[in-house]
Image (spheres, rainbow, N blue to C red):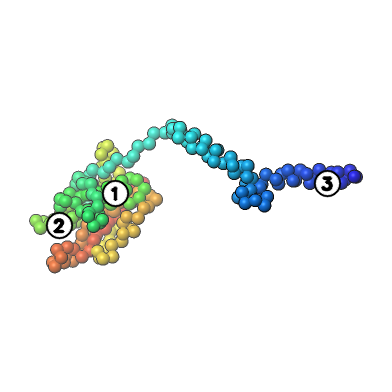
Amino acid sequence: MTAGRRRLAAVAGAVALLVLPTGCSGGREGRYAGVSSTAATRAPEQEAKGLHAARGFRSVRGYRTTPVPVRVEIPRIAVASTLDRLGRARDRTVEVPSRWEVAGWYAGGTRPGDPGSAVILGHVDSKSGPAVFYRLGELRRGDAVTIRRADGSSVRFVVQRTEQYPKRRFPTDDVYYPTLTPALRLVTCGGQFNYATGHYRSNVIVFATIER
């Protein structure tokens, strides 16, 4: 064998050694994602060790959940109300506040200040007169809404727009759909009153974003 052929054979052998671990054999076990059967066999054991290590991990940072809201203040329309916690009614719709003079926060959703849409509801009136959100429809772009929280902190939102929608076309996605930044939705009744059902035909909704 000449020197040139010996060098060619040596290179071929080296290539073979590099290709072999990729598992290109005819067996199904050795062809998964180009991983050799030996590596595939070791994977569960390595994964188990990784999970064990993760369970012992403790972050050096301390994280606290956002405090719950306890009060809403809207100077523009003279609103200063405590907040009841609202859940779901029996028909799976969001509860409405039990007191006409007090607003409520939907506790099944986002906390004000967290990314997402926090929702606060209030009555527009009662049989005895105006309720907590009687003047909600007067809010305009730039008006401020302050939410006080249980730990004494507060978060301030700025109104972007105020809209009225027929209840049969309530914008569920716009009100409850998650957002990447903190947002606030204030909801009450509005429009014409239906004396046959005893309810308003529409909803007034204020859309606000966190103040930067």
Question: Who's the residue at 14% across and 63% down the image?
Answer: 198
> Which numbered circle lies on residue 108?
1
| Mark 1 / mark 3, whichever is N-terminal | 3
Q: Nearer the viewer, mark 2 or mark 3?
A: 3
> Along the horizontal axis of the image, is 26 left or right of 56?
right
Q: CA distance from mark 2 to mark 3?
A: 93 Å
Q: Residue furthest left?
A: 128
| Disc 3 packing (10 Å; few <14; some 14–19; many ≥20) | few
As shown in the figure, which amino acid type bears the numbered disc 3?
A: Leu
The residue labelled by disc 2 is 125
**Whole-percent x, y for residue 48 in the image:** 51, 38
Instruction: Residue at 70% x, 45% y: name it.
Output: 20
Q: Residues within 10 Å of mark 1 (few under 14, many from 20)?
A: few
Crowding at mark 2 (Cα within 10 Å: few <14, some 14-19, many 20+): some
Helix, strand or loop status at disc 2:
strand
Q: Are marks 2 and 3 in contact (CB under 8 Å)?
A: no
Q: Which residue is mark 3?
A: 8
- Residue nearer the viewer, 171 or 78: 171
> Horizontal placement of 191 versus 53: left or right?
left
Residue 192 vs residue 54, the one in the foreground = 54
- Is residue 99 among what the camera can see? yes
View extreme (front): residue: 27
The kind of residue on which mark 2 rests is: Asp
Label 1 and label 2: CA atoms lie apart by: 25 Å
The amino acid type, in three-letter code, at marker 1 is Gly
The secondary structure type at the circle numbered 1 is loop
Percent across and percent down for residue 125 are: 15, 57
